[in-house]
Image (cartoon, grey):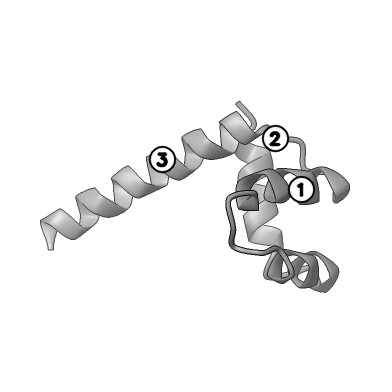
Amino acid sequence: MSFEAITNFFDDLDNKEDLAKEFEAIAADENFKANLVALGAKFGYEFTLEELEKVAASAKRMQEGAAAQE
């Protein structure tokens, strides 16, 4: 899995203005994740929709676990 590429992509949203602008322009619709993968590829971050979904699911589980401990 390209966890590193996904991590780098999201880290770079804070540092690369052109990437951030295009990210903000993505509509929050049913194609959001697919468009995110395409944007990543455009900027050299190679990850698949399946990989992105696995990372998102893991992050959600971690967030829910942290909220349960509060």
Furthest-front residue in view?
Answer: 30
* Disc on the earlier residue, 1 or 3: 1
Identify which residue, 3 or 34, lies in the foreground.
34
Rendered image quadrant of residue 34: top right
**Which residue is rendered at x = 21% and y = 49% of the image?**
65
Q: Position of residue 67 (x, y in %)?
A: 20, 59
Give SS at disc 3: helix
Q: Dot 3 corresponds to which residue?
A: 57
**Do labels 1 and 3 touch, CB within 8 Å?**
no
Which quadrant of the structure image shows residue 20? bottom right
Query: Mark number for residue 40?
Result: 1
Asked whether disc 1 touches disc 2, contact meaning CB atoms under 8 Å apart, the reply is yes
- Which residue position holds label 2? 47
Residue 59 shown left or right of residue 21 in the figure: left
Alpha carbons under labels 1 and 3: distance apart: 19 Å
Q: Quick one: label 1 or label 2, which is nearer the N terminus?
A: 1
Quadrant location, the N terminus: top right
Q: Quadrant of residue 12?
A: bottom right
- Residue 55 in picture, x, y percent from top left: 49, 39
Marks 2 and 3 sit apart, C-alpha to C-alpha, by: 15 Å
Q: Is residue 45 left or right of residue 36?
A: right
**Residue at image x 30%, y 44%?**
61
Identity of the amino acid at label 1?
A: Gly
